[in-house]
Amino acid sequence: MKAGITCGGIGPYATGEFIRNSAVAAEKAGFTHYLMPDHVVQFGAYPESDYPYAGGSGQDAPEPSDDAPLHFDDDTYANQDPRHPLIDPVMGMCWAAAATTTLEVGSNILVLPQRNPLFLAKSMATLDSFSNGRAILGVGAGWAKEEFDAVGVDFKQRGKRTNEAIEAMRRLWLDEYSTYQGEHFAFTNACSFPKPARKGGVQILIGGESKAAMRRIARLGDGWLHYNMPVGDAPQMIGEMKDMTRAEGRDPDSMRIIKIVYSSATLDDLKRYRDAGVTEFNIASSGEVPPSGPSLDAKFAEFAESVIGPIGEL
């Protein structure tokens, strides 16, 4: 099995130097993909929103350092300070792709309904063509109403906008002359070049575990980027997703099912996820990667032995 990592893009890890050095180190260590988070703006409080990932994902999180920007085991939004820098993920993906040769670069996750799909399709196609097919787009519908209000998008329409944006980008990536007619986005005989290098266009991995999210994945996704999946629930949840995918006339075995775990995950849990149908893992760093210096390379060398090696043998 393969594993990727999410470690850059926020707080002390939101620098070009860290993205470049950690991406190079991740590729050398054997990680196969490198993902970055997304929020256009953040707030000191979210009075109208419930953070859906509070308390972790059914796993025991590693003990974070006090100055780590993210605390996954907290009962509120994992980011400890809204003033932490948080990069634009597409820009970060470009930076990481330019420093590497085989590493897939992507988002974990990009709040898709806040974006215009024509602009995003252009950016992602350009990145994919420049990187020889290494771009992946992890997307979700979003959870923070305050963000949607700030960018002028109706929070209640986020599901429909997400579905339409995926459909519209597919048309722009795959058709010479692209036409799409939706409630929120529409165009006729539009030309958008360059096209992605990857056959079938940029892969879209979709996050979420609600019924609406699962229907979206079954109908439109190239894969499932999953966080809230306790190991005991994995067989039932993945089985339901595969049934929904078959009902859409699609082959569930072609789907990437990426489970986000921590570096402290036990080998027994990883095996149980694999047996349930997980195809890849993504290691969510909780501040254990040093921001710079020789210790950064040493940490990734440690990951190669303690994480990549055991996962590769599953």
Image: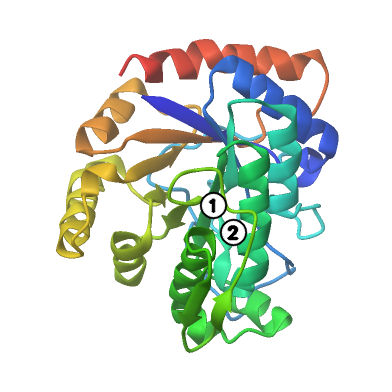
Marks 1/2 in contact by CB < 8 Å: the verdict is yes
Q: Residue 144 appears in which quarter of the rendering?
A: bottom right
Residue type highlighted by circle 1:
Leu
* On-image quarter of the N terminus: top left
The label on residue 5 is: none
Q: Amino acid at mark 2?
A: Leu
Residue designated by label 2 = 110
Instruction: Report the side of 181 relative to 246 (left or right).
Output: right
Residue 289 appears in the rendering: no
* Quadrant assignment, res 258: top left
Can residue 159 be seen?
A: yes
Q: Position of residue 7 (x, y in %)?
A: 64, 36
Give the structural element (helix, strand or loop) at label 1: strand
Closer-to-camera residue (173/211): 173
Picture quadrant where residue 256 is located: top left
Q: Is residue 292 left or right of residue 42?
A: right
Rendering coords of residue 15 (x, y %):
83, 40
Of residue 106 and residue 46, the one placed in the foreground of this image is 106
Q: Which residue is mark 1?
A: 137
Q: Residue at x 76, y 25 (%)?
A: 21
Structural crowding at the residue carrying mark 1, measured as other residues with C-alpha within 10 Å and reported as few (<14), some (14–19) or many (≥20): many
Where's the C terminus, which quadrant?
A: top left
**Horizontal placement of 42 versus 78: left or right?**
right
Depth check, mark 1 against mark 2: the one in front is 1
Q: Position of residue 159 (x, y in %)?
A: 45, 77
Nearer the observer, 230 or 148 = 148
- Mark-to-mark CA distance, 1 and 2: 7 Å
Secondary structure under tag 2 reads strand
Give the residue displayed 36% in from the left and 63% down from the top: 220
